[in-house]
Amino acid sequence: VPGHGSRVPVWLLGSSLFSAELAGHLGLPYAFASHFAPEMLMEALEIYRSRFRPSARLAKPYAMAAINVFAADTDAEANRIATTMMQSFAAVVRGRPGLVPPPVDDINAVLTPSEQAAVSSRLKYSAIGGKETVRERIAQFITQTGVDELMVTGMMFDLKDRVRSLEITAEVRADLGRAQAA
């Protein structure tokens, strides 16, 4: 049997208030999908923590939240590569999801004002920029949410952009870890 005896930790991953309540009631670690459903993140974390019951798996609440990260060597380049996800969110709003689109230089030229508002709302918990911008945004997100862990994601068209984004994000993580240890 695959995984037998491996003691894989059980988490509840959700994007609703019910999932937060259930994770708390069951005494499980909770991960919230704030990378695409940011509207209820703070309320979900509050419900999870307030309804948490210690269990055989976990003595106290332990939460993770997802954040979109688009890191590049410059803020301008990060904003450009993030347009892939912006276009994908807009395609869902239009009811026409499809393949991952390439980035564009001017997102305002391809989105209507209402689509721009919808996309902006979905990207509420995102870190888009160069290393310093991403570091500030991630630190702010951790402080704001009080989460124990982050799940980092970011829909990017080009593999080299994704690899570079993850390299920068790893540097930011190391920097934040050193700052916390000091």
Image (spheres, rainbow, N blue to C red):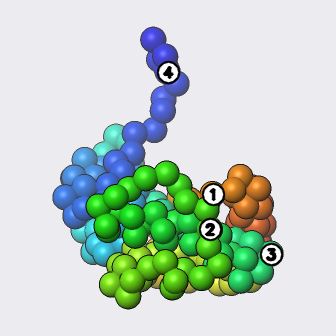
- Characterize the local packing of mark 4: few (<14), some (14-19) or many (20 or more) Cα atoms within 10 angstroms: few
Q: Amino acid at mark 4?
A: Gly
Kindly indicate the quadrant of the structure image that contains residue 177. Answer: bottom right
Judging depth in this view, the residue of 108 and 163 nearest the camera is: 108
Gap between marks 3 and 4, in whole Å? 40 Å
Kindly indicate the quadrant of the structure image that contains residue 179. Answer: bottom right
Kindly indicate the quadrant of the structure image that contains residue 115. Answer: bottom left
Gap between marks 1 and 2, in whole Å? 7 Å
Q: Position of residue 68 (x, y in %)?
A: 54, 67
Q: Which residue is mark 1?
A: 157
Could you tell which of marks 1 and 3 lies nearer the N-terminus? 3
Residue shown at 19% from the left, 58% from the top: 18
Could you tell which of marks 4 and 2 lies nearer the N-terminus? 4
Could you tell which of marks 1 and 2 lies nearer the N-terminus? 2
Residue shown at 32% from the left, 68% from the top: 93
**Foreground: disc 2 or disc 3:** 2
Dot 3 lies on which element?
A: loop
Residue shown at 56% from the left, 66% from the top: 84
Gap between marks 4 and 2, in whole Å? 39 Å
Q: Which residue is mark 3?
A: 73
Q: Pointer 1 and pointer 2: residues touching (CB < 8 Å)?
A: yes
Q: Which residue is mark 2?
A: 103
